Structure formats: C-alpha cells, structure tokens
Amino acid sequence: MCTQKIILVSVFSLLILCVCRPPASAPPLSKSSTSLYPGTIDHCAVNRTSYITLHTVANWKCAQSFTGDGRTLTKCKFYLCKYLAERGVVPDNVVVKLYAHSAEPATTFGTDGVPLGDALATSNGVAAQSLPNYDTGYQWIDFTFPSPQTVNKGSHYFLSVEYSKKGDHTHSVRVGIDTLFGGTAHNGNGADSLTRNPWVPHSQYDVLFWAIHEDSSSSSSSSK
C-alpha cells in the first residue's frame, strides 16, 4: 500500500511539474545571427522594451556603439516611429551619423564610451513624417550612406540617430531601445545628447540597430 502511495505521489508530482512549467520561449535573435540581412557588420535586434524621444526640447541625438569588421558601412537600420498626438506633421528629416569612439582605455566600450568629434559619415535623410505613427507600431527604417566609410576590423564606432527640428512631445521621433537585463543585449552601450550639451553614456540600455555592408549582390537579396 505504501509503495502504491509513493508511486501515485511521484506521478502526481510529475504531472504538476509538466503542467506548471512555462513553455520554452522562442530563442531571441542573437548577436551572432546575421542571416536576416546579408552583409551585417554588427547589430542589436532582440527586444524593444522602451524608447528614446528625439526633439529639441529633450534628446535630439541617440547613439549606439558597435564594432567594425573591416568592410565599408553602406547602410544601417533603426527601429523607429513618430509620435503625432495632434493634427499636423512631424517636420524635417531624420539622419544617422557615424562617429569614432571616444579614446580607449580612458573610456570603455560597452560602459561609458561616447561619440567623438565630428561625424565620419552622414546618411541620406528620411522624412520624419514618413515614419509609422506610434499607435501602429515601430518599423525598421533604412538609412543609406552616399559616401560609405570603412569601419576597421576590431575598432569601435558609434551610430547616432539625429533629429534636431524644433518640436515637443506631441511631435517627435521615437527610437526603439532594449533595457532588458540592464542593457546586456549588445556588448556596446547607448549614449544621448541634448541640444549643445555633451554626450552622456548609458550602459543600462542598447539602441536597436543594424550596421550593414551592402554590395550589389546583397542589395538584391536583403530584406526590407
């Protein structure tokens, strides 16, 4: 009888374990997964848990550090939307700029690095009004560089989304970021800047981005 009880309890415990254990979640898009966009140099595309608002009342630059692989940076993607709470338009263009990384080891990649000096390259502008509105969701937005810049293998850089048109919280651009687990989605770090103010590093979040080298063959096959 005791043996039967033990067996019944064991089977019951196993059933509880099977029922209560949460289903395994789909694996996140890891940093090593580059199959979505051929020619990927570096990226962070795991989770959008929050956002940075860009306008001249608050931040107007939002950047993410990354590592070069020796190829030319021809294109990048950021996860964006516009916030338009009232009638009207979100004016002007959004651009992405490539910067050198602040001096190392005085600053550390992934912790307190910030963009350094003038931009090394500037993308073509994307009309802010063309971005999806916040209530319909974010989208990956393409930015192309008319003068591609080589990003040296193993060297660190920053890609910065910039929108400096005067506005307020009802007319702005939002940049998707990942704050999960204290900004460990990517081994770089974020940074932002207010108008005319120095860059401020942020190790607690990563900006969602793709840095891409696109040649004629990958251009025809890459996803949009």
Image (spheres, helix red, strand yellow):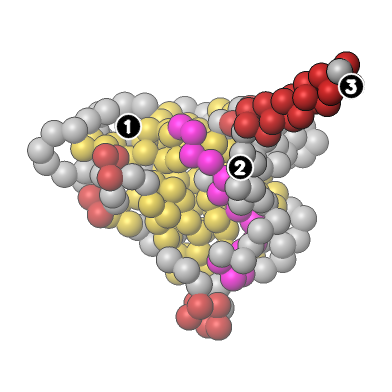
Find residue 4 and name its label. Answer: none
Say what amino acid the circle numbered 3 marks.
Answer: Thr
Q: Residue at x 47, y 27 (%)?
A: 197
Q: Residue at x 37, y 33 (%)?
A: 53
Residue position for label 2: 25
User: Mark 1 falls on what kind of element?
Assistant: loop
Check the image and name the residue furthest to the front: 1
Q: Is residue 99 visible?
A: no
Q: Which residues are magenta?
A: 37-50
Residue 38 painted magenta: yes
- In which quadrant is the C terminus drawn? bottom left
- Closer to the observer: label 3 or label 1? 3
Q: CA distance from mark 3 to mark 1?
A: 74 Å
Q: Are marks 3 and 1 in contact (CB under 8 Å)?
A: no
Q: Is residue 163 visible?
A: yes
Which one is in front, 161 or 101? 161
Residue position for label 1: 56
Is residue 55 shown left or right of residue 191?
A: left
Is residue 50 shown left or right of residue 202?
A: left
Disc 3 residue crowd, few under 14, some 14–19, many 20+, Cα 10 Å: few
Residue 182, quarter of picture: top right
Residue 114 painted magenta: no
User: Mark 3 falls on what kind of element?
Assistant: helix
How far from the left and from the top, in percent, is residue 106?
77, 32
- Closer to the observer: label 2 or label 1? 2
Say what amino acid the circle numbered 2 marks.
Answer: Ser
How far from the left and from the top, in percent, is residue 55?
32, 34
Which one is in front, 137 or 169? 137
Residue position for label 3: 3
